Image: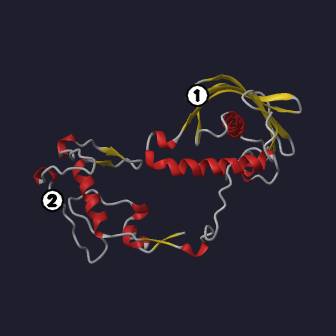
Amino acid sequence: MYQMLASRDKLFGRFPCGLLPFGSAGMSTGKGREEVTPEPLESRPLRSAPNGSRSLAAEERPAIATGDGIELTAAKFEVVKSFCRKYTVHFRLDRSRDTTAGPRDWRMRFCMLDRIVELERGVRLTAVKTLRAEEEYLKDHFPRFPVMPGVLMLEAMFQSAMWLVRVSEDFGNSVVLLKEARNVKFADFVEPGESLVVDAEVLKHDDHTTLLKTQGAVDGTTAVSARLVLQRYQLRDQNPDSAAMDAFMVRCMRKEFERLYGSPRVA
């Protein structure tokens, strides 16, 4: 957890609601009525920005409109910068609650499937996701009408398609990403206690992408459907030094697949 070590009063103690007094050229910092008067912008040489571009001169800098009706011109903006440079806000990382110590669990943290029930290599896959009432996101989606968010229904279809692609090529690529979602249609809700049965079917397969037809159904009624385009590649294709990472990712995906489907028994 980050802890702010500088007090808020040092930054905004003398100014209501954190607003700075832009009405005068100088300004009070609240420490002995010290006046801070920035050097005129016109007299400063242009400085190079970190990305190689130059800073804008005063006449080139647009005014900034704030939500309080105050217009910050280039000169007034420099006053703000001068004030901010007077204090340094330090942050400290509190590792007392670090839960990552010890052996790491590389299981997928965002798995939207409970199990894979049917699989035919290069053809189709069927998986199941049962929505549980204790899912954290249901508290806000929605408080009095908990239903599975549509984006997570789409994620469940993508993960089903992803596993079908990985198994079909015997985990030949370390990275399988969703490139495009076409004709996404939502027809029904998924409520706590219901199971979303997701089907994925390969329509077209080339060297780098796969087109699949996917749908999710609840009690035999289609709740969501889409056509997904997945992209496949190896990290080492772009950086030869990433070969070890490719092997590591493939091992992790194989372990996760065994958790969802059990020992290999692909048709």
Q: Which residue is mark 1?
A: 209
Of the numbered discs in the image, which one, if any, rests on residue 86? none
Q: Residue at x 48, y 43 (%)?
A: 236
Q: Is residue 185 visible?
A: no
Q: Amino acid at mark 1?
A: Thr
Of the numbered discs in the image, which one, if any, rests on residue 39? 2
Q: Is residue 57 visible?
A: yes
Circle 2 packing at 10 Å, graded few (<14), some (14-19), many (20+), is few
Q: Secondary structure at mark 1?
A: strand
Disc on the earlier residue, 2 or 1: 2
Q: Are marks 2 and 1 in contact (CB under 8 Å)?
A: no
Percent position of residue 141, x then y: 72, 45
Percent position of residue 242, x then y: 48, 48
Horizontally, residue 67 falls left or right of residue 60, namely right
Farthest residue to the bottom: give it.
32
- To which quarter of the image does residue 131 belong? top right
Q: Residue at x 68, y 26 (%)?
A: 212
Q: Nearer the viewer, residue 227 or 202?
A: 202
Farthest residue to the right: give it.
219
Q: Quadrant of the C terminus?
A: top right
Q: Amino acid at mark 2?
A: Glu
Establish if 254 lies above or below 189. below
Percent position of residue 265, x then y: 81, 40
Farthest residue to the left: give it.
43
